[in-house]
Amino acid sequence: MKESRGFAVGEQALTSFDRQFSMRCRVQRPDRYRLLDALPADAPRIARGSGVSYVAASFGVDAITQDMAAFDRLLAFDGERGLLRVEAGARIGDVERFALAHGWYLPVAPGHPAATIGGCIAADVHGKNPARDGTFRAQVAALELWRDGGGVTVSPDHGGDLFADTCAGFGLTGTIVSATLRLARAPATLVVRRIPVESLAEAAQVLRDALNVPLLYGWHDGRPGAFGRGVIRIGLDTGDATAAPPSRLPDLPIAIAPSRIPTWNRLGIALANGMIRRRWCRPGQSAVTLADTLFPLNAARPYFAGFGSAGFVEAQWLVPHTRFAAFAAGLEETVARMRPRISLISSKLFAGEPDGLSFDGHGIALALHLPAPADAAQRAFLDALTELALAHGGRPNLIKDSTLDAAAVRRALPGFEATRERLRRWDPDGHVRSELTRRIGL
């Protein structure tokens, strides 16, 4: 598609980051707020940030994608109170670099630096320690939505229903055009302590004991015979308030060309796990700049390319503490029996309250990356994982898992129908839609 901005609508092939959805879509690139309403009133539409969603949240077969890339300005900064107002198309990597240069940062940031502020709000993403920092809505002091030809400003204390429904509302309440963000004072460096673990149950206890640190997550081997072995990374504030230097790594690209020969076969997974175990799964600690801890995916180009054209899926489930040990044991047994290819497992601690479609609650979250999810054996394992997680009260991350269908989502989220009705109040004719909302029945 030729790069054009304004009213014009053209066609473009759009692909989800996990490569599970690809289709030719109609795309508009507005560069004025008034052009957000230039489409026919009954035209299906969906806003798009950088397009790094795993689950096709910003395009659909019958919807016009409204690309928000032109709306990327930093609008106002209060350096005394740590408040930053930005347009919704601003990328979080750019926002973090600006904030760090002034001694501040956003504690909640997703892994991809190209994710936009509007996308972070619409998905209510989490960061490196959601148990301490919550999800992205905790960083939003106010936001502006474009609805019915004009801007509407809402906050947690003003227009609360519309604010709450917009966070993890996947774009259905209106087009997010700007937000005022709450920043936190930034340490220059973190001392990252490594604690090896031999099982997911052990990892869960280490995570619970750490709790109030800026960075807290685990990496684990997903192979039978080595299942759950790994390391917990605990980032400790050094107390140095000097602004952190920029990361030395360039940002992860929006699109990564797949390797012609996929890396993540059984041999590749075994070699990678062995290397990581030798290098990182040993007790110790090292100083790391805050900038490098915010976006660890910047070092992961070969990793994502290695999935090849078949792509991958990230199945992420949050399981309550009281059920986690049994869930982990069941998962280990299922992996031993079905022998799926799992390129990695990560673990995080959560301590929030679930609201609507958000990914939050009290428990341990596991994210599993599986190559070639369309393969019969891989898909069978994903179905078994879903059933196992549901049996233990698991809550799925809808913005990550492209294999979940409407039936599974309704079983996982008892309040789904009530949330759906709440969202439909803001768009009663169902004009806002995407492949994600179609698949899960929103």
Image: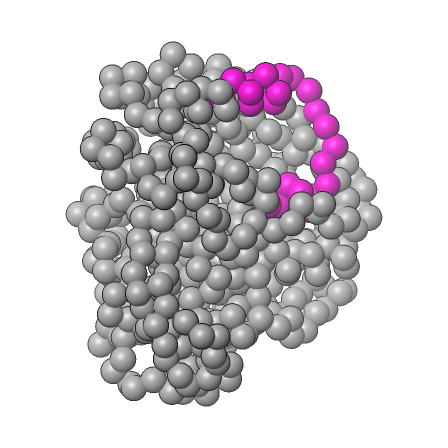
Nearer to me, 423 or 262: 262
Residues shaded magenta: 273-296
In this view, which residue lies farthest toward the top? 225
Tell me if residue 112 comes above or below residue 288 in the rendering.
below
Quarter of image, res 336: top left
**The magenta stretch spans residue 286:** yes
If the image is split into quadrants, where does the N terminus sit? bottom left
Q: Residue at x 36, y 43 (%)?
A: 309
Horizontal and vertical percent for residue 172?
33, 68
**The magenta stretch spans residue 131:** no
Position of residue 69 in the picture relative to residue 373 (left or right): right
Q: Residue at x 51, y 28 (%)?
A: 219
Tell me if residue 113 comes above or below residue 231 in the rendering.
below
Horizontal and vertical percent for residue 360?
41, 45
Horizontal and vertical percent for residue 107?
61, 49
Horizontal and vertical percent for residue 364?
43, 33
Residue 357 seen = no
Tally of numbered tags: 0
Quarter of image, res 432: bottom left
In this view, which residue lies farthest toward the left? 407
Nearer to me, 21 or 235: 21
Nearer to me, 258 or 243: 258
